[in-house]
Amino acid sequence: MNTLFTALLLVCGIENGSPICRGLSNPGLYPTLEICLESVAQGIKTFESNGFKVAAYQCYEWNTGLEIKDLL
């Protein structure tokens, strides 16, 4: 069984004067944790350069359900 990872970001910004956060994911699946983390880094750079704050991130491993803290 192949290992697949999803890159997840919790992105926050201001809408109508109030803070709002949304969970977002890249629709692609990644074969390694390293590639997933590269996608997370690109996502953080893109969102923060557009005035948003990334409050949290995660690379989720689908086969085992492990989170990044369990994989490092």
Image (spheres, rainbow, N blue to C red):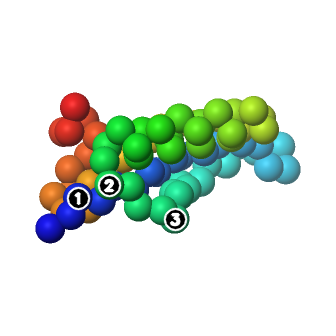
In this view, the mark in front (1 or 3): 1
Instruction: Give the quadrant of the N terminus.
Output: bottom left
Q: Which residue matches tag 1?
A: 3
- Residue 1 in the figure: left or right of residue 55: left
62 in relation to 53, above or below: below
Measured Cα–Cα span from mark 2 to mark 3: 13 Å
Percent x, y of residue 22: 59, 54
Q: Earlier in the sequence, mark 2 or mark 1?
A: 1
Q: What residue sits 46% from the left and 51% below the top?
A: 8
Between 43 and 31, the one lying in front of the other is 31
In this view, the mark in front (2 or 3): 2
Measured Cα–Cα span from mark 2 to mark 1: 6 Å
Q: What residue sits 36% from the left and 47% below the top?
A: 59
24 in relation to 13, above or below: below
Proximity of marks 2 and 1: CB atoms separated by less than 8 Å: yes
Measured Cα–Cα span from mark 1 to mark 3: 16 Å
Q: Which residue matches tag 3?
A: 27
Q: Which residue matches tag 2?
A: 31
Q: Quadrant of residue 54?
A: top right
Q: Quadrant of residue 65?
A: bottom left
Q: Type of residue at label 3?
A: Pro
Proximity of marks 2 and 3: CB atoms separated by less than 8 Å: no
Instruction: Give the quadrant of the C terminus.
Output: top left
Secondary structure beneath dot 1 equals loop
Secondary structure beneath dot 2 equals loop
Q: Earlier in the sequence, mark 1 or mark 3?
A: 1
58 in relation to 41, above or below: below
Percent x, y of residue 64: 16, 58
Q: Type of residue at label 2?
A: Pro
Decide: few, some or many residues near mark 3? Use Cα within 10 Å; few <14, some 14-19, many ≥20: few
- Outermost residue toward the right in this view: 16
Residue 18 visible to an observer of this rendering: yes
